[in-house]
Image (cartoon, grey):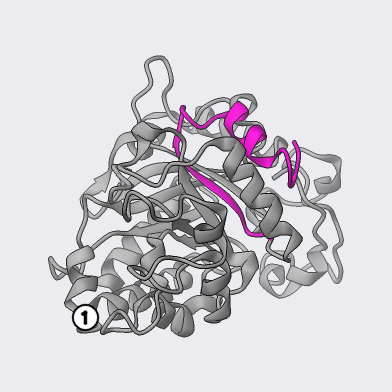
Amino acid sequence: MHRCGRSYLSAKFMMVAMRFAHLAAVLSTLCFLCVKSTPVNGTAFDGLSQQARDILARATPAAPHFVVYGDKFVSGSTGPPAASSIKGFNVFILSFLLIEGAWDKAFEWTSLTDAQRATIKSEYAAAGIKLMVAAFGSTDVPTSTGADPIAIANTMGNWVKQYNLDGIDVDYEDFNAFDAGNGKAEAWLISFTTQIRTILPQGTYILTHAPVAPWFSPNKWGGGGYLKVHQSVGNLIDWYNIQFYNQGASEYTTCANLLTTSSSTWPNSAVFQIAASGVPLSKIVIGKPATTGDANNGFISTSTLASCLATAKNQGWNGGAMAWQWPNAAAAWIQAVRASSWPV
């Protein structure tokens, strides 16, 4: 995500019986399995094949989701940071996987050896952190350039499997296609999402989207906007890392216009307004820049964001928070943001 468009868990208890339908083909020799979603080297996985362990480690976590993207080059750091440095986050997303291939942090991941990647994944699993890749960002405009959503979904889905990641984030930022209002942007996203789920099955891999908040404004987009996408394939999307920034100097900068009543410029695109349009609160992750330098506008302090999260939680929301980007958003940032809601 360059999120102007962007240049750019804790382990939770999960009963595998609830996911048995997804695991049956792999674990056909078992009639029943019930374990916690523990690290891949945990004793709860003893006796399972490596394939079964990998599936359980990737299984989609429950809300809240605390997500951070990494796109910046950081001297001395190749690939994702040490899990200890992002304590409090439970998802790290490598940016970006483009139509032409992997760049930036995503490319760094490919430059590591299999053994290095396995060690990092093991460390992340032990810390309850999922490792994903972000697709597209502001660099790619797939609808405007006539890219084939089926072919790209196949390529990207297989890339995720090849490099043993937990899932993919669809950071679609083809603004011209959305603004055209002819439905081509929405149709492209629906086709891409449907196809990539055939490569990355639900419950085994995580699939998220990262739209800008205004795309949820009803009756504003000729093609239906992200409400059309959600109505069509929202059941295939695990959650939305929503960009509540870069939409205007005063947009989404108070708890009131972030949570309950957005401006007339982008009507009905605050958190609870999006929920009123049919998007589950558990799928609405509030995205913010880590510093004023990480976005054009929309920044709020960690103390304000912490207050907003606490207010929303008290009203039934549990989606979580997203930050653009590491290393400006690291352990101290998310611990401050979670302090009044889900303290680390």
Please, is residue 215 above or below residue 135 in the view? below
Residue 253 within the magenta-colored segment of the rendering = no
Q: Position of residue 29 (x, y in %)?
A: 79, 67
Please state if 277 lies on the left or on the right of 220 as rendered. Answer: right
Which quadrant of the rendered structure holds the C terminus? top right
Task: Out of 41 and 167, give the one closest to the viewer.
Answer: 167
Q: Where residue 125 sits: x, y (%)?
A: 67, 40
How would you rate the neighbour count of disc 1 (Cα within 10 Å): few for under 14, some for 14-19, many for 20 or more?
A: some
Residue 231 at x, y = what percent?
Answer: 47, 84
Q: Is residue 266 above or below residue 77?
A: below
Amino acid type indicated by mark 1: Gly
Q: Which residue is mark 1?
A: 181
Magenta stretch bounds: 318-344
- Name, please, the residue furthest toward the top: 76
Task: State the image coordinates of residue 174 (x, y, percent, origin top left).
Answer: 23, 63
Q: Secondary structure at mark 1?
A: loop
Residue at the location (33% across, 47% down)? 3
Residue 126 can be seen in this image: yes
Looking at the picture, tell me which residue is in the foreground, 25 or 100: 100
Name the residue located 33 percent from the left edge and 36 percent from the top edge. 107
> What residue appears at the point 17 percent right and 67 percent down from the top-left corner?
176
Regarding residue 56, the answer to whether it shows in the image is: no
